[in-house]
Image (cartoon, rainbow, N blue to C red):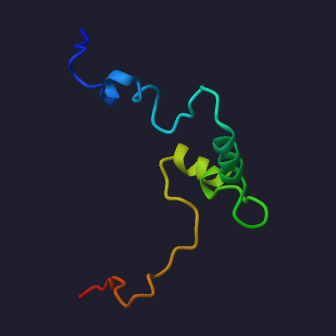
Amino acid sequence: MSNPELPDTAMATGNDEGSPGERSTGPLAEDERTLLEELDKPAEGTAQPAVEDSPEVATAVDDDAPLPGSGGGNDDGLDAEFTDR
């Protein structure tokens, strides 16, 4: 039950509707539409596909295997050293 003596909160106004990251289905104002168009463009040049979307990564995920790559050190002088001592 709503109490008219209490102020509205996010819960009462419906600001919590939808899933996180989900775009609102309501109409956008002109300045919001312009901003959204700018955000959808890549910063410089053309957009590159994400590494996570590659077939090699999908195969590694399906096989529960390590991701493909050359690996290597950290270049910070803290690499582990394994010996038979």
Question: What quarter of the picture does the N terminus occupy?
Answer: top left
Does 17 sit left or right of 47 as displayed?
Answer: left
Q: Is residue 48 above or below residue 10?
A: below
Q: Nearer the viewer, residue 49 or 64?
A: 49
Residue at left offset 53%, top offset 47% = 61
**Residue 6 to residue 64: above or below:** above
Q: Is residue 64 left or right of residue 70?
A: left
- Find the residue positioned furthest to the top: 1
Residue 25: percent from left, percent from top: 60, 26
Q: Is residue 36 above or below residue 73?
A: above
Which quarter of the figure has residue 31? top right
Q: Residue furthest front?
A: 5
Residue 10's image quarter?
A: top left
39 shown above or below 2:
below
Near-viewer residue (80 or 17):
17
Residue 68 percent across, percent down from the top left: 58, 62
Q: On the picture, is 5 further left or further right than 47? A: left
Q: Residue at x 47, y 48 (%)?
A: 64
Residue at the extreme right: 46
Q: Quadrant of the C terminus?
A: bottom left
Q: Position of residue 24 (x, y in %)?
A: 56, 30
Query: Closest to the observer: 20 or 76?
Result: 20
Q: How many marks?
A: 0
69 relative position to 42: left or right: left
Provide residue 7's location: percent of width, then percent of height.
26, 25
Q: Dividing the picture into quarters, in which one does residue 23 lie?
A: top right
Q: Could you tell me which residue is drawn at 33 percent across and 22 percent down?
A: 12
What's the residue at 78%, 66% (across, down)? 45
